[in-house]
Amino acid sequence: MFIDQAEIYVRSGNGGNGMVHFHREKFVSRGGPDGGDGGKGGDVIIEVRHTMNTLAEYRHKMRFLAPDGKNGGPNNMSGRSSENLIIPVPPGTVIFDALTGDLLGDLTEPGMRLLVCKGGRGGRGNQHFATPTHQAPRTGEKGEPCEEKQLRLELKLIADIGIIGVPNAGKSTLLSVLTNAKPRIADYPFTTIEPNLGVARIDQDTTVVLADIPGLIEGASQGAGLGHDFLRHIQRTRVLIHLLDGLSSDPLADFSQTNGELSLFDPHLSEKPQIIALNKMDQPEVQEIYPDLKKEFKKRGHDLLPVSAMARTDIQDLLFKAFNKLADTPGLADTEIPLPVYRPKEDPKQFVITREGSNDWRVAGAGIERSAKMTYFEHAGSLRRFQKMMEMLGIEAALREAGVKDGDTVSIGDYELEWQD
């Protein structure tokens, strides 16, 4: 089954805790601090795999958790860093933050990688806090907490040539005779309910990838029919074959309607080069209207090619014309408008103080909350270090200015501290 949208939860690994420990060995007095460092938590990385062509793998598996780093040990033994978690996706996958809608990355080439959640660094053991004047520090760090995100994955097929048109125009039939693809084909509208890909051979050394896009009807750009789900797949194509249904009551109106829906969905889609073909020329009534239609299209600056996908008439000529147009069209990287990739900018020094009650305060800020999670509050040395950090960031002065009093509760993240002057 072709699945081109998925939503997944990802979480990186926590950093391992650093250890507060002192060397103990027979005949060695005052061995000194030897607490080891914690290992780094695993990153969550999304990687393009050329062997994938759908997001079906994420229809049932929707949670991805990277392993945590190991804790540090005695004798300066560092904890092991964890391996990164690699999530494979097909080429053409666009990654969004599902909660904010921000674009995180647009992955088009095999091997491309996107770091979506960085693993927490390992906490430092008390060996790092020893100084000539402070030779027995009871100070250490817990591992840095993980990052987590809810991601929305959208797949936009990457094809050289896209085949578009109204339902029942013969797009799937054309794809089947030009390539080895075997799409579902029937004589009623909306037979095709998912895009199909096929590879057509131009000569012994040259091939092109074609995509059959499900039929577009009026209102497709607003969600009518199947168009809203699949219009985005046209964005990746470089040249379009616009196939008209010769048995339609008004092929010219169909042409205008389809191009109108392209423009409403994305103004740049209607600017893509198009090869226009009138299908079902094996039917006498289509042969009858072709000369007048050709004149009408000529007035609008377009050539109209007569083809019959069912009878395989002139389809190779259509393919070669599309390929020649493809050769004159810049590559995907040159034609696409660059997508604005969101890069969060986090100032670790920023904080906000709010009063939650007559004696309750909350300090919110990415940097100070992360520091609180990495502090051993049960060790006096670590607690003093945290107090100095609050002083350097200006949090202590800001709390005094706000009116904090002795005995008030100050909450930072999940921790509650009692204020003492």
Image (cartoon, rainbow, N blue to C red):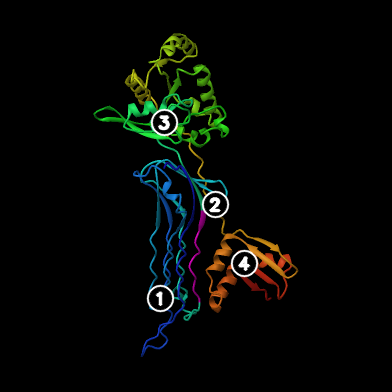
Which residue position holds label 3? 212
Q: Which residue lies furthest to the left in this view?
A: 204
Please say if 25 is above or below 302.
below
In the rendered image, which residue does mark 2 sit on?
Answer: 345
Examine the rendered structure and indicate whether residue 253 appears above or below residue 397.
above
The reply to whether callout 2 and callout 1 are in contact (CB within 8 Å) is no
- Alpha-carbon span between mark 4 and mark 1: 28 Å
Q: Give the range drawn in magenta.
A: 139-149
Task: Give the amino acid type for the residue marked by disc 3 in the picture.
Answer: Asp
In which quadrant is the C terminus drawn? bottom right
Dot 4: element? strand
Mark 1 and mark 3: Cα distance apart in space:
59 Å
Q: In the image, is residue 128 above or below residue 95?
A: below
Please give the residue where the numbered disc 1 appears in the rendered image.
73
Mark nearer the viewer, 3 or 4? 3
Camera-near label (2 vs 1) is 1
Residue closer to the observer: 389 or 44: 44
Location of mark 4 (residue): 412
Of callouts 2 and 1, the N-terminal one: 1
> In terms of secondary structure, where does tag 2 sit?
loop
Q: What is the x, y in percent for residue 96? A: 51, 46
Left or right of 157 in this view: 201: left
